[in-house]
Image (spheres, grey):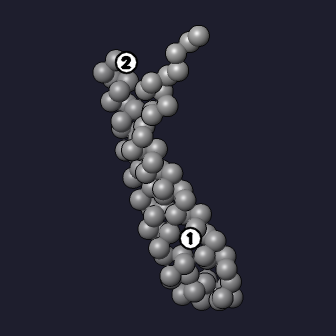
């Protein structure tokens, strides 16, 4: 792997982590715990489980983004040997 390609992969991973992972984890805490206030501001009915569902989705997306950053290229580091 050339130096430029490695740097590009690292930069892409950092951008993905910052643009997807961090906001998703923030939303993970915001939707289930502050969702009712947000629903009131938007004029939506409160008590709807949609905010909790959205929070779970955001948490999953954040975990996947962090795992992708942490394990960048993990399966391809040691590809299986050809028979």
**Are discs 1 and 2 less than 8 Å apart at CB?**
no
Residue 18 visible within the image: yes
* In the image: residue 83, left or right of residue 30: right
Q: Which residue is mark 2?
A: 1
Q: Residue furthest top?
A: 83
Residue 25 place in picture, x, y as percent: 45, 64
Secondary-structure class at tag 1: helix
Residue 46 lies, with reference to residue 8, above or below; the image says below
Q: Quadrant of residue 3?
A: top left
Residue 20 visible within the image: no
Q: Which residue is mark 1?
A: 55
Q: Residue furthest front?
A: 83
Secondary-structure class at tag 2: loop
Picture quarter with the C terminus: top right
Which of marks 2 and 1 precedes in the sequence? 2
Q: Nearer the viewer, residue 28 or 78?
A: 78
Q: Quadrant of residue 9?
A: top left
Picture quarter with the N terminus: top left
Residue at 50% across, 82% down: 33
Q: Nearer the viewer, residue 36 or 44?
A: 36
Residue at 33% across, 30% down: 7
Residue 63 place in picture, x, y as percent: 48, 56
Tally the numbered discs. Answer: 2
The circle drawn on residue 4 is none
Residue 56 place in picture, x, y as percent: 58, 67
Residue 45 lies, with reference to residue 70, above or below; the image says below
Q: Residues within 10 Å of mark 2 (few under 14, many from 20)?
A: few
Residue at 54% across, 56% down: 61
Q: CA distance from mark 1 to mark 2?
A: 39 Å
Q: Residues within 10 Å of mark 1 (few under 14, many from 20)?
A: many
Residue 70 place in picture, x, y as percent: 39, 44
């Amino acid at each position: 792997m050339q130096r430029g390609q490695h740097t590009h992969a690292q930069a892409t991973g950092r951008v993905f982590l910052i643009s997807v992972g961090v906001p998703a984890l923030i939303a993970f805490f915001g939707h289930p715990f502050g969702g009712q206030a947000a629903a009131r501001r938007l004029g939506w009915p409160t008590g709807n489980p949609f905010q909790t569902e959205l929070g779970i989705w955001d948490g999953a997306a954040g975990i996947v983004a962090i795992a992708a950053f942490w394990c960048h290229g993990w399966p391809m580091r040691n590809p299986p040997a050809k028979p």
